[in-house]
Structures are given as structure tokens and as C-alpha cells.
Image (cartoon, rainbow, N blue to C red):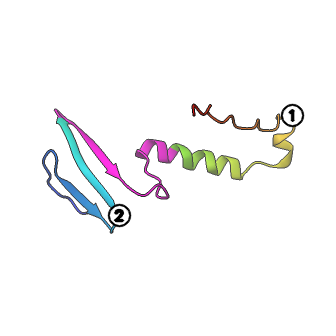
Amino acid sequence: MLVLSRQRDESIIIGDNIVVTIVDIRGDKVRLGINAPTEIPVHRQEVYEAIQRENLRASQLEPKDTQGLEPPRPRRRPNSST
């Protein structure tokens, strides 16, 4: 693991297109700003782990497990105010 020291408003670059900036430091908490392309998912670790658990659980479903479920509803589009 690479360990770096940074101060508020300083950044690190990951690859060519990800920038992580120290936005604020308060006590034992650090606020990060992450600028990454939209095709690169960025999650807190606990959210990522929950997604992985759900994906694993869903991959183990059998057709009988989905009987009785309603089909997905169409997504609503936001109203355009033009």
C-alpha cells in the first residue's frame, strides 16, 4: 500500500484521469473530493461490499425464487421545463 501525506486542498492523481483532493480535515475525519470519469464507479468501501454481497446473492437465485414477483415498472422521466 502506498501511503501519502497531503494537506487540505492538495491532490493525488491516479492514472491519467482520476484526481483525489483533500477537501476538509476535521479531527479524525477527512473529506475527499474524487473526480473520475463516469464509467469508473466510485464507492465507499462499505457500499461496495454491500453491492458485492447482493450481486453474489442474486447470482445464486433460481427461477423458482422469482415466482410471484411483479415485473419492473418503467422508469419515469423528469418533466422538461422548456
Q: Amino acid at mark 2?
A: Asn
Residue 46 included in the magenta stretch of the image = yes
CA separation in Å, label 1 and label 2: 45 Å
Image point (21%, 54%), residue name: 11
Dot 1 and dot 2 residues touching (CB under 8 Å):
no
Question: In the drawing, does residue 6 fall left or right of residue 69?
Answer: left
Looking at the picture, how far across and down is residue 74, in whole percent?
75, 38
Res 68 label:
1
Q: Quadrant of residue 19?
A: bottom left
Residue 16 or 41: which is nearer the viewer?
16
Image point (56%, 50%), residue name: 52
Image point (82%, 41%), residue name: 66
Q: Is the residue marked by circle 1 packed among few (<14), some (14-19), or many (20+) residues within 10 Å?
A: few
Looking at the picture, how far across and down is residue 25, in whole percent?
18, 37
**What kind of element bears circle 1?**
loop
Q: Amino acid at mark 1?
A: Gly
Question: Which quadrant, please, contains the N terminus?
Answer: bottom left
Q: Is the residue marked by circle 2 packed among few (<14), some (14-19), or many (20+) residues within 10 Å?
A: few
Q: Residue furthest bottom?
A: 16
Looking at the picture, how far across and down is residue 49, in whole percent?
49, 47
Which tag is nearer the camera, tag 1 or tag 2? 2
Residue 1 or 20: which is nearer the viewer?
20
Above or below residue 74? Residue 2 is below
Between discs 1 and 2, the one toward the N terminus? 2
Q: Which stretch did the figure color magenta?
A: 26-49
Res 17 label:
2
Above or below residue 28? Residue 38 is below
Question: In the drawing, does residue 80 fall left or right of residue 12?
Answer: right
Residue 70 or 82: which is nearer the viewer?
82
Number of numbered labels in the structure image: 2
**What kind of element bears circle 2?**
loop
Res 18 label:
none
